[in-house]
Image: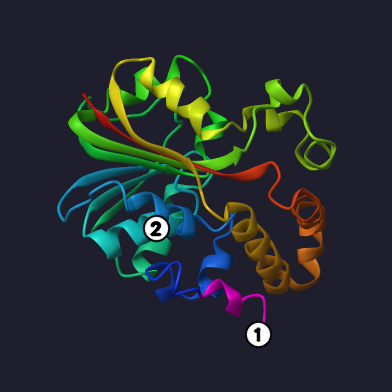
């Protein structure tokens, strides 16, 4: 079995397995976003007709998944990917009428307060959400009782507790790993605001192995260009799940 074929895992990720892995790899901006999202949405109670903000939506795979699997109306907001490029992905996936692409910076969102039933962010939150001022800002855009879910690279122990970034991680991402936190760190960061009730905070079971499988498949998919992923593969093989995973957090606005 090729590494790409290993991305079809109906036993663990039945919804994600319905998507062409080559299509998903072609939209790569980080570890398999559909696996994280499928795991996360199990605790979000998304229902048809809800208006959902996909914050840091990248090239659009997560927004397609949300629209197709849950029948929600999605606003796909990203700063790095032009809205026109994302809109082409949505149209090609047959969800163009249910997904609106918006180019927006996370700290300057162009939306009305209380205008979303749910906010989802996959593999992006560490770039802006560690700011102590950010979560109260983001919560303004969620209606009372609305749900918020975040999945991003996580650590089994805090870097501050370790006293240093582990060498195999530092060699690849450098100081940026200081923004990778444990699930409990995120729980506290959200709950201390008293704006939400955190409904779950956990490291994804097998997250390290998921990331490893994705990286091997990406290298195969990209051919010669996949050599650029070798440092990431080396980091994951050296880690063996000791420090690296994904943090999944969900909450309800009070």
Q: Nearer the viewer, residue 125 or 39?
A: 39
Q: Secondary structure at mark 1?
A: loop
Answer whether residue 142 is magenta in the image: no
Vertical position of residue 136 compared to residue 15: above or below: above
Residue plotted at (84% across, 37% down): 167
User: Is 5 on the left or on the right of 33, as rendered?
Assistant: right
Mark closest to the chain's N terminus, 2 or 1: 1
- Residue where numbered disc 2 is placed: 38
The reply to whether dot 2 and dot 1 touch (C-beta < 8 Å) is no
Q: Is residue 4 left or right of residue 56?
A: right
Q: Which residues are magenta?
A: 1-8
**Colour option used:** rainbow
Viewer-proximal residue among 80 and 125? 125
Q: Quadrant of residue 155?
A: top right
Question: Per the image, is 6 magenta?
Answer: yes
Residue 161 location (% of width, % of height)? 69, 22
Q: Is residue 82 left or right of residue 63?
A: right
Real-space CA distance between mark 2 and mark 1, rounded to the nearest whole angstrom: 24 Å
Residue, disc 1: 1
Pick the front one: 173 or 113: 173
| Other residues around mark 2 within 10 Å, as few (<14) / some (14–19) / many (≥20) | some
**Secondary structure beneath disc 2?**
helix
The residue furthest bottom is: 1
The residue lying at 44 percent from left, 47 percent from top is 57
Image-based side of 168 in relation to 207, left or right: right
């Amino acid at each position: 079995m090729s590494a790409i074929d290993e991305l079809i895992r109906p036993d663990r990720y039945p919804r994600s397995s319905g998507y062409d892995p080559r299509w998903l790899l072609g939209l790569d901006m980080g570890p398999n976003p559909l696996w994280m999202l499928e795991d996360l949405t199990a605790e979000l109670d998304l229902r048809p007709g809800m208006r959902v903000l996909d914050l840091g939506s990248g090239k659009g795979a997560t927004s397609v998944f949300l629209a197709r699997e849950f029948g929600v109306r999605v606003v796909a907001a990203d700063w790095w990917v032009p809205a026109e490029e994302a809109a082409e992905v949505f149209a090609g996936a047959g969800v163009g009428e249910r997904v609106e692409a918006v180019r927006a910076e996370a700290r300057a969102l162009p939306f009305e307060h209380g205008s979303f039933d749910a906010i989802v962010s996959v593999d992006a939150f560490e770039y802006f959400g560690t700011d102590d001022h950010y979560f109260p800002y983001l919560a303004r855009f969620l209606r009372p009782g609305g749900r918020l879910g975040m999945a991003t690279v996580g650590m089994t122990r805090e870097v501050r507790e370790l006293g240093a970034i582990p060498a195999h991680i530092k060699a690849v991402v450098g100081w940026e790993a200081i923004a990778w936190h444990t699930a409990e760190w995120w729980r506290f960061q959200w709950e201390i605001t008293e704006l939400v009730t955190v409904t779950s905070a956990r490291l994804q079971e097998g997250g390290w192995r998921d990331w490893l499988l994705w990286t091997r498949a990406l290298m195969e998919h990209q051919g010669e260009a996949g050599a650029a992923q070798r440092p990431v593969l080396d980091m994951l093989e050296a880690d063996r799940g000791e420090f690296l995973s994904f943090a999944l957090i969900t909450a309800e606005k009070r």
